[in-house]
Image (cartoon, rainbow, N blue to C red):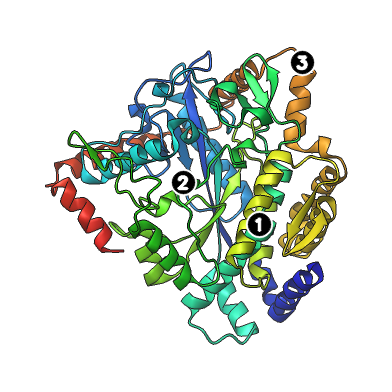
Amino acid sequence: MFKQLMNSVKSNLEALGDDARLIQDVSMGLEREGLRVDQQGKLSQAPHPIALGSALTNANITTDFAENLLEFVTNVYHSPEDLYQALDEIQAFTAENLGDELVWPDSMPPLIDNVDEIPIAQYGSSNAAKMKTLYRTGLSHRYGKMMQSIAGIHFNFSLSDEFFVALQKATKNEQSLTDFKSDRYLHLMRSVSRFGFLVPYFFGASPLMPKSFLSGNNNDRFEKFDDETVYIKESTSLRLSDIGYSNNKCKFTVSFNSLKDYVADIEHAILTPCDKVSHIPIKKDGEYQQINNHILQIENEYYASIRPKQVLKSGETLLAALKDRGIGYVELRSVDIMPTISTGISVETIRFLQAFMTTCLLTNADPLCNMEYEQNQRNLALIAAKGRTKDLSLNVQYQEQPLQELLQSLLEWIKPVAEILGPEYSATIAPLSAMITDSNLTPSAKILNELASSSIQYNDYCIEKATQYKNHYLTEEVLSDEKREAFKMLAHKSVERQKALEAEPQADFDEYLSNYFKSI
């Protein structure tokens, strides 16, 4: 299997010749979530700070599910260093405008006594704002608020049109450029489906969680870690395990074999009622409880570790954009927040993810059937929950193989691409190789070992880290005066933009919803 993978990457790189350098022409972005908490680690009940702008219209600082769940969104950058700096600056500006509040530094939430501490995000009175809040209301009824309090990092990735033109010419492909790009991104997605378990193994950082998160579910798998916290000894990422994000209500399939099939499958899920959520009224006492009773309310509800994306025009849905302009970039969603780093992700991790995604795109990936896709999902969940188990094996492409051998082969597969990207990329390989032979070197094990060897409880550990990062941003002058003023102006303009939207005539909300789905 890996000989075939290596040969396909080698073949495409050799066909590119001198143009292989074009794999360096990358565009990347990050989306990092983080809960606002007080000095004791309790979820903030204050509204989204006005100094950060409008959560509806600020492109860099918004909210995710909850009013207290911040989301930092970078612009597009072309190097890991610039991307890291951009995220660092967004978080610095946020820290300066949170008063006494902190940003929780972990993917799993703090101790939550009552789900009412997780208020659904509010975006204003415009129809677009109401739609965002309603979608989240539906999620709360379908999956519960506790699951929605989990935070993570999404890594957005694309290569330049110049690269795709060169690869298309080198491989004598006669498709349109739009179709060729979409097909290569689908090759990437199929490879991530098969081999994406390496992300939680190498970068998983959520091996424990507050016991309040369980709410009586799957208790027998968890052991007590401290008075407030439970864990699974060999876990790497509880966020990615079956306790975390998943479409676990209505069964449906999504193809990664063609863009036409992918769009058709998502459309089917959006337009097809599901008896598992039909008990939730669409309206109750005149108030919407969910957008609809379908498998998915909208495209965003499809929780996959990798998704195709396209830059949207005003008022455009993702499916319409994919149909019109193909896949513009892909979003990797399986990255945990690293609690030992102020930004939640390191430059080295960004470099490795870039090399991994590039390798996946250059690999000619066989079609992926539903049975194999489901096995790949089981592999991801197994690594998330039990990834550091000794002598663990996975079934990959219908072959049972030892995890250590799989991971070592995957690093060998990525090495040629890392070498072209530069020595800083090649340097990311050796530390990961060491984690294969000694799982105690993985981030998840390090966190557990650090806590076990100290007297501090996990909740206090996270508060200590959050306070440390807050002080860092307030004292280290991460922001230049010019950049600070730019963020202030962006926040101000976003508030004005929200006001302008709300001043526009608004159609009846029922009509607005109906028109939204006409484009599907």
Which residue is found at the position 38% from the left and 20% from the top? Answer: 45
Residue 107 placement (x, y as % from top left): 58, 33
Measured Cα–Cα span from mark 1 to mark 2: 18 Å
Tag nearer the camera, 2 or 3: 2
Residue 351 visible in this rendered orientation of the protein: no
Horizontal relation, residue 98 to residue 504: left or right: right
Which residue is found at the position 79% from the left and 53% from the top? Answer: 407
395 vs 49, nearest the viewer: 395
Measured Cα–Cα span from mark 1 to mark 3: 39 Å
Vertical relation: 368 (above or below) 483: below
* Secondary structure type for disc 1: helix
Look at label 3 and name its amino acid: Ser
Residue 249 marker: 2
Look at label 1 and name its amino acid: Gln
Total number of numbered discs in the rendering: 3
Residue 437 placement (x, y as % from top left): 88, 44
Vertical relation: 247 (above or below) 96: below
Give neighbour class at mark 3: few <14, some 14-19, many 20+ (Cα, 10 Å).
Answer: few
- Reading the image, the residue beneath label 1 is 375
Asked whether the beta carbons under mark 1 and mark 2 sit within 8 Å of each other, the answer is no
Horizontal relation, residue 284 to residue 196: left or right: left
Asked whether the beta carbons under mark 2 and mark 3 sit within 8 Å of each other, the answer is no
The quadrant in which residue 413 appears is: bottom right
Which is more N-terminal, label 3 or label 1?
1
- Reading the image, the residue beneath label 3 is 454
Which is more N-terminal, label 3 or label 2?
2
Residue 312 placement (x, y as % from top left): 37, 59
Give neighbour class at mark 2: few <14, some 14-19, many 20+ (Cα, 10 Å).
Answer: some
Horizontal relation, residue 108 to residue 496: left or right: right
The quadrant in which residue 173 appears is: bottom right
Which residue is found at the position 80% from the left and 18% from the top? Answer: 453
Look at label 2 and name its amino acid: Lys
